[in-house]
Image (cartoon, rainbow, N blue to C red):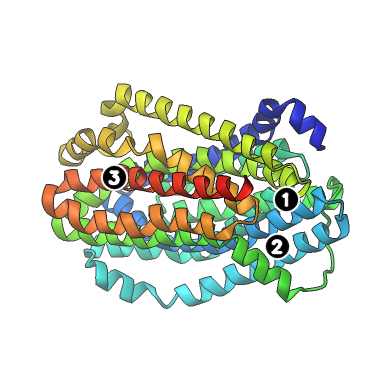
Amino acid sequence: MDLEQIRSSRTTMILRFSVPSIIAMMLTAFITIADGYFMGNYVGKEGIAAVNLGLPIIYLYLGVGLMVSIGGAAIAGMSLGSGDREKCNQIFRQTIAVTACFSVLLSCILFFCFPPMLSILRADDRVITHFREYYQIMLLELPVMVVNSSFGMFIRGEGSPRYYMKVSILSVVLNILLDYLLAGYFYRGAAGIAAASLLSELVCLLCILYYFRKKAHIYHLGKFRFSGEACVQAMLNGSSEFIGEISTGITMFAYNFVIMRRIGTDGVTAFTIVGYTAYAFNMIIVGFGQGASPLISFCYGAEDKALAADIRKKTNRYVFGAGAAAFLLMAAGADGYSSLFVQNEQVSGMIRSGILIFMTSFFFSGINAITSFYFTATGKAFESALISFSRGLVVLMACIFTLPVLFGMTGVWMAAPVTEGVTLAVTAGCLYREALREA
């Protein structure tokens, strides 16, 4: 990767780095959707609701992992762009070690948090049973998932995004096969579906470790000198991603709290199934963001700020187009979509009436997220955090607690598009402020 190559073929470079990342992230999303399919067909709608009640736990892991790894990868990328290969390699080793330590510590803490969480949500007995079966195993799986994701960012920084894509394909195929065997054939229910995820992530980890032992050219595993300054800088630089994921977890908890009290388990199940579309689209956005971020960091570190900004603009156009395509696709297939997961007419009716309202948020969310990635990749943590905080917590929480009161389940579907529309104005303000500074 060099500056002239990026400058002369910007679109090609963006797609070269982003498409494998998008495929890898979509495969990750497909694992979640496949789990939902097996949960709905072999456990029941209560199983789907149970998984959704614990989604704040997953977002907590993602927040901690992304805070350390995206911040660390950005510092490593800028160091590589400036020619300091030794520093970028030290940052790599430290980032992986800190990510692993934080994730394992989180599992130890969360093990004791299940009872108060379920008490607040007032879940029924069947949902509680499935929740415990699933998430007690996921506390082992999630640290492995976070470390694998962190490794994947550095594999892309190596210029080998296709390798991580192939590993992700293997993980998906193995996960689906194990889902079928453990849930569908051996009837292990929610615990079997969680065990399938754990086993597939462990296989993925072995493939990644092989890459860094045998194929890596820049980043290598080994001893490192811990730098508290670099660790703090990485976490500050990745703070917007942490805020974004934690905010999503908090708002997901709020969604569940409101829906369980106003609509019940059927409402949570419907919201979960519609949420799979948002999760899949978010993986596309993250794929573009992770693909473009190394290019942006490299260009910015090499003092070509105009090129870094142009990469952001092109990537924003791609995610807007992806949002429009996703909306049109679901508009044509909304009826068949719900029947993949449940055969309950009340749940299906909620999905049909709300999915297109909810998906209008896709027209704005990609632009907001990619701009946040851009500010992180260029070391502007405040602007990135402001965007993430707006779309992930402040505006969304206000919508969650007001719109359902006024419009019922329709208000639940309206919360996301209203939030992204308001945040778009915040994003425009941040870009305008940067333009004034750079002028």
Q: Position of residue 250 (x, y in %)?
A: 36, 63
Front-most of residues 275 and 112: 275
Q: Position of residue 120 (x, y in %)?
A: 25, 71
Query: In this view of the protein, can residue 281 be seen by the observer?
Result: yes
331 left or right, relative to 405: right
Q: Disc number at residue 418? A: 3
* Amino acid type at image mark 1: Phe
Residue nearest the observer in this picture, 139 or 367: 367
Do we see residue 263 in this rendering? no
Q: Are marks 1 and 2 in contact (CB under 8 Å)?
A: yes
Residue drawn at point x = 36 percent, y = 28 percent? 327
Front tag of 1 and 3: 3
Task: Please state if 383 lies on the left or on the right of 7 as rendered.
Answer: left
Q: Which mark is residue 362?
A: none
**Separation of disc 1 and disc 3 at Cα?**
35 Å
SS under mark 2: helix
Instruction: Pick whichever, 413 or 406, lies toward us.
Output: 406
Q: Which marked residue is nearer to the observer: mark 2 or mark 3?
A: 3
- At mark 1, the secondary structure is helix
Query: Badge 3, how many Cα within 10 Å: few under 14, some, many 20+?
Result: some
- Sequence order check: which comes first, mark 1 or mark 3? 1
Q: Is residue 18 left or right of residue 118?
A: right
| Disc 1 to disc 3: CB gap under 8 Å | no
> Residue 5 versus residue 183: which sits nearer the camera?
5
Q: Position of residue 68 (x, y in %)?
A: 62, 63
Does residue 88 appear left or right of residue 370 in this picture?
right
